[in-house]
Amino acid sequence: MTALNSIVLLTGAGISAESGIQTFRASDGLWANHAIEEVATPDAYARNPAKVLDFYNQRRTQLQDPQVAPNAAHLALAKFEQALTAQGGRFTLITQNVDNLHRRAGSQNLIAMHGELQSVFCPACGHRQTWVHDLNSTDLCPVCAESAPLRPDIVWFGEIPYQLDACQAAVEQADLFVSIGTSGQVYPAAGFVALAKSAGALTAELNLEPTRKDFDFCLYGPATQVVPAFFEQLMNQPTQLPSFCQ
């Protein structure tokens, strides 16, 4: 096997769960008491903007908790990216998460395909800005003269993910595609593994439990254990997948 020089990762809520970020589909998670239709669609925002803004304000506030920090899995990915790129390799991290933990860990080539909690944008002119406190319906764009209020910079259900073309291009050029902590149920990200396989890439899943049967390799357990172990061995043996994968 030749060196795995182009590596693409897809991360989901499972990588941040051990940092205290409640997962999307967990029965005891933050979303359990909120129907998707109430807080995560354009129609919900148009129907009850105060409820939607409050929901994301709570999630944004959670990121300010000093106990919410990048965990060993986030840090391992940032370390691996630095090592791979220093050797001339290509590394792309696509995340479905809207938290800021990958950035805080030091990840550089990052695509937040579902947006970011600490960002807002103007629907009228598209201006984006960092936002770390509560967002209210009275907060207006500082750039344009439109009266439309700022909204969370989040891709809601029914909207097109950010940089989707760049995500798909990276997956098609990968030697190795790794899915980490994602349920594999939300499209278009759920289709990335099939796209990678059709382009000839090896595929691996690192997760608490299996989500599908078509990965070439898999490793199951808490993200803080399996992610550092996987990428440490891959960093030491760049021409093969870790031997403990089954």
Image: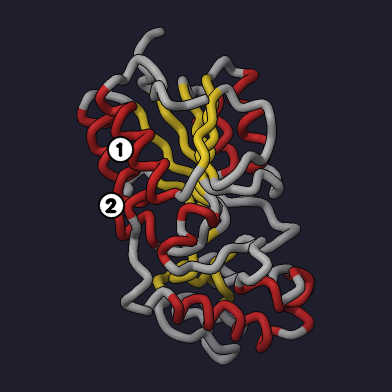
- Element at label 2: loop
Q: Is residue 166 visible?
A: no
Quadrant in the rendering for residue 76: top left
Above or below, 229 relative to 149: above
Specify the amino acid type for callout 1: Glu
Q: Which mark is residue 106?
A: 2
Quadrant in the rendering for residue 193: top right
> Where residue 219 sits in the image (x, y, percent)?
50, 35
Above or below, 98 relative to 139: above
Specify the amino acid type for callout 2: Gly
The Cα–Cα distance between marks 2 and 1, rounded to whole angstroms, is 9 Å
At a point 32% along the width and 52% down the height, the residue shown is 72
> Where residue 81 sits in the image (x, y, percent)?
30, 37
Task: Kindly check if marks 2 and 1 are in contact, taking CB atoms under 8 A apart as contact.
Answer: yes
From the viewer's perspective, is 239 left or right of 79?
Answer: right
Name the residue carrying label 1: 81
